[in-house]
Image: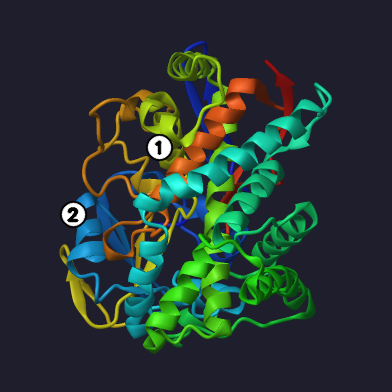
Amino acid sequence: MFMFGFREPEVLERKGLDFFEPARPKPPEKLLGLHDLIISARRNLLSVWPAADYRSSVGQTRILGRQVILVNSPESVKYVMHTRHENFERKSPQMRRALEYLLGDGLFISDGETWKMRRPLVADIVHKNRVPTFGRTMESVTAEMVERWRTTPAGQPVNVLTEMAELTAEIIARAVFGNDLGATAATEVIEGFSRYQSLIDSFNLGYFLGADEGFPVIRGPRLRKSVKRVHKVIDKVVSDHLAGHGDHDSMIELLVRRQKRNPELGLDVNALRNEAATIFMAGHETTAATLTWAWYLLSNAPWVEEQVLAEIEKVTGGRQPGVADVPQLEWCRAVIEETLRLYPPVPILARQAREADRIGNIDVDPAALALVVPWTLHRADDLWDRPERFMPERFLGDKRPIPYSYIPFAIGPRICAGMNFGLTESILCLAILIQRFRVRVAEGFKVEPVCRLTLRPRGGMPVTISAR
């Protein structure tokens, strides 16, 4: 069973000549009252899980009478995310309320008939068979970043989170919309979403006070401004595309064509904007965070970096890696998969029960909150060997985790539709950049992982970049 204890958490990090245990909040030990729980959750959702929760288990508690269930074993994850998916399909009121202003009824937070109609459509557009087509965009945009990085003065710190966000925003813009986003528009989206995350309250008190749908988010002037910055960019590229200025093979063009063949989909301009915004935000934010964490991990594990570089040289012979090389880049893939284990982009997957149910030996109330937590599941000491260590070799060859113990893209029918796109993008971007540059976390910077909507390093990640 999970308990909460609040204090400004100590950040644990440990390294040696041949091992690295990356940054994580020290688990609390004491119970706390509602006031301290709210403060802790609003500051960092990672800091509320005590040591007892870093083992596979199922437990429950109540917050102001609302039942909250921790679903933290492979069997219970399978039950909630797959076996009884239809009862636990809905994202939590907290997540829906937090994102509805930004994403409308986009696939990430929709459910019911809207989700059933649009999921196959979006899944088909980002299907793995289309990845080679989008891979050429990934190659060219990353090559452009290589040229830009060549002009970066050695030793001058840059925020690699911003760098990776600009890279992935440009890739997803060209893939979704078929035209260049540009640095100015990319900055507007990145800063707008970052500001949105900092302002949004992911602890919806109304839900715990008895409102099954939670309270609507107060749309103050700063929140409205951050949304306007994002929507302005996306609206322009959607409008440009509909006016004939987009690429024929872009994702949004495929949506438009599908709507013409199937008018019952109801993809009007607003729906197109919502789906485009969802693909855009999910596509650039999660991959940017994953690449940022990968640079941090490799910066502190030079023995892994040596294996990665040796493999790239063997596969490419010194030329730039391409999308066709990805299946042979096993160390690059293992680094990305281990990064996703340690720092899953969405570390808490919250679901709302539609009706009464039973998870393990726990009777579930209607409208209860079921929490599947990759952050703790991926670090459960009875499921993983030395779970706090960065060990990409655990994903090499035929080695695979226990089913339903590794879920960085969720699992079941609501598994991320863009999983193959995101994995290929992460592996390819990492391979192209690490072949040409040495990236090191700036000396003296203390890394703290923090989660509000997604998992990021607090304050970004200053690094130095030097050519190899």
In this rendering, the label closer to the viewer, 1 or 2: 1
Residue 266 screen position, x and y as percent? 44, 87
- Residue wearing tag 2: 75
Q: Nearer the viewer, residue 175 or 443?
A: 175
Choose top left, top right, bottom left or bottom right for residue 157: top right
Q: Is residue 336 above or below residue 304?
A: below
**130 with respect to 36 (left or right):** left
**355 with respect to 341 (left or right):** left
Numbered label attached to residue 307:
none
Residue at image point 68% right, 66% down: 196
What amino acid is labelled 2 in the image? Glu
Q: Is residue 3 above or below residue 92?
A: above
Residue 146 screen position, x and y as percent? 69, 31
Q: Can residue 77 be seen?
A: yes
**404 with respect to 9 (left or right):** left
Q: Earlier in the sequence, mark 1 or mark 2?
A: 2
Residue at image point 67% right, 24% down: 440
Quarter of the image containing the N terminus? bottom left
Q: Residue furthest top?
A: 17
Q: Are marks 1 and 2 in contact (CB under 8 Å)?
A: no
- Residue wearing tag 1: 337
Residue 333 screen position, x and y as percent? 41, 32
What amino acid is labelled 1 in the image? Glu
Q: Nearer the viewer, residue 135 or 462?
A: 135
Question: How is this picture coloured?
Answer: rainbow
Q: Can residue 454 be seen?
A: no
Pointer 1 local density, CA inside 10 Å: few below 14, some 14–19, many at least 20: many
Choose top left, top right, bottom left or bottom right for residue 464: top right
Q: Is residue 299 above or below residue 47?
A: above
